[in-house]
């Protein structure tokens, strides 16, 4: 992956650029980035969170290549509600992406 630097002159411009990058990546691109970060941080062979017990709020125990870890997470409905409550531009963009991805899974 080629590293690209984008210099901005304000926090607003940097935030705007960040939102544009997130939109350009799309859901699949963000998932690929997350998988690569996970691989670099924890090594390979870790199970997908969706394969863990439970689908809502929970603390599944996932066994990876290193010591077992406990992960806390919230379900999709709670995540969407939290993003709506925050109301930031990025959160609103995420809601559109997540509901589109969910609709694709339901159909």
Image (spheres, rainbow, N blue to C red):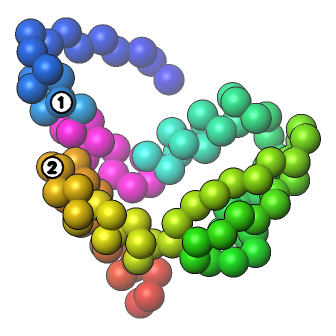
Q: Position of residue 25 (x, y in %)?
A: 34, 44
Nearest the eye: 22 or 53:
53
Left or right for 96, reference 65: left
At 79% from the left and 34% from the top, the residue drawn is 43
**Occupied quadrant, residue 100:** bottom left
Are the two marked residues, 1 and 2, in contact with CB atoms closer than 8 angstroms? yes
Residue topped by disc 1: 15
Whether 54 is among the magenta residues is no
Q: Name the image quarter holding the C terminus.
A: bottom left
Residue topped by disc 2: 89
Residue 93 at least partly seen: no
Residue 26 at least partly seen: yes
Q: Main secondary structure of the magenta part?
A: helix
Vertical relation: 91 (above or below) 13 = below
Q: What range is drawn magenta here?
A: 19-29
Q: Position of residue 58 (x, y in %)?
A: 66, 69
Q: Callout 1 environment at 10 Å: few (<14), some (14 to 19), or many (20+)?
A: some
Q: Position of residue 42 (x, y in %)?
A: 76, 35
Left or right for 58, reference 16: right
Q: CA distance from mark 1 to mark 2?
A: 10 Å
């Amino acid at each position: 992956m080629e590293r690209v630097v984008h210099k901005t002159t304000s926090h607003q411009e940097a935030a705007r650029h960040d939102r544009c990058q997130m939109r350009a990546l799309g859901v699949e691109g963000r998932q690929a980035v997350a998988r690569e970060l996970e691989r670099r941080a924890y090594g390979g062979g870790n199970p997908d969170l969706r394969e863990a017990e439970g689908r809502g709020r929970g603390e599944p125990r996932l066994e990876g290549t290193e010591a077992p870890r406990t992960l806390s997470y919230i379900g999709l409905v709670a995540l969407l509600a939290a993003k709506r409550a925050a109301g930031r531009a990025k959160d609103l963009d995420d809601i559109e992406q997540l509901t589109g991805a969910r609709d694709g899974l339901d159909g």
